[in-house]
Image (cartoon, rainbow, N blue to C red):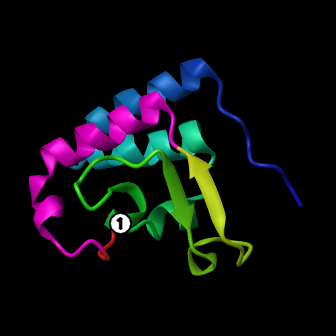
Amino acid sequence: MKQAKVLNETEIKKLMKVCELTRYAERNRLIVSLSVLSGMRACEIANLRINNVLSDTNAVLDLIVLDKEQTKGNRRQTVVVSTALKKAIQRYISTNPQLLSQDKGRFL
């Protein structure tokens, strides 16, 4: 099986700049950040739920726990949330406050 190409820092910066040109810039920046900063796969990011990243008090969690149904290998997975990723999540939530008033089981 072929390995995915690993982006260098310059390519990541270009990708983030392209995100700014899109309709849903913050969402797209968060998607790229989740992939680059945590190594999550596209299918795992697509299956993220609000309660995977936010506590009951709406604080960003230090760990993202993915149930086996949310992962490629059908195994439960834990992802460490770095400071940079935590900031990206907080920035996205601040631009979408309606997420805090929705059911925590909904998709992010």
Quadrant where the image shows the C terminus: bottom left
Percent position (x, y) of residue 71?
63, 71
- Point 65% across, 31% down: residue: 7
Percent position (x, y) of residue 22?
26, 43
- Left or right of 64 in this view: 54: left
How many residues crowd mark 1 within 10 Å: few (<14), some (14–19), many (20+)? Answer: some
Percent position (x, y) of residue 88?
35, 36
Under circle 1, the secondary element is helix
Is the residue 99 above or below the residue 75 in the image?
A: above
- Point 63% across, 77% down: residue: 68
Q: Residue furthest front?
A: 57
Is the residue 50 above or below the residue 86 in the image?
A: below
Query: Quick check: can you spot residue 22?
Result: no
Q: Which amino acid does the dot numbered 1 rest on? A: Asn
- Splitting the image into 4 quarters, where does residue 8 fall? top right
Foreground pick, 96 / 59: 59
- Point 46% across, 39% down: residue: 33
> Mostly what secondary structure, the magenta segment?
helix
Query: Quick check: can you spot residue 90?
Result: yes
Quadrant where the image shows the N terminus: bottom right
Count of marks placed on residues: 1
- Splitting the image into 4 quarters, where does residue 99 fall? bottom left
Q: Which residue is mark 1?
A: 51
- Point 32% across, 64% down: residue: 50
Q: Residue furthest top?
A: 10
Indicate yes or no whether the magenta region holds residue 14.
Answer: no
Q: Which residues are magenta?
A: 81-104
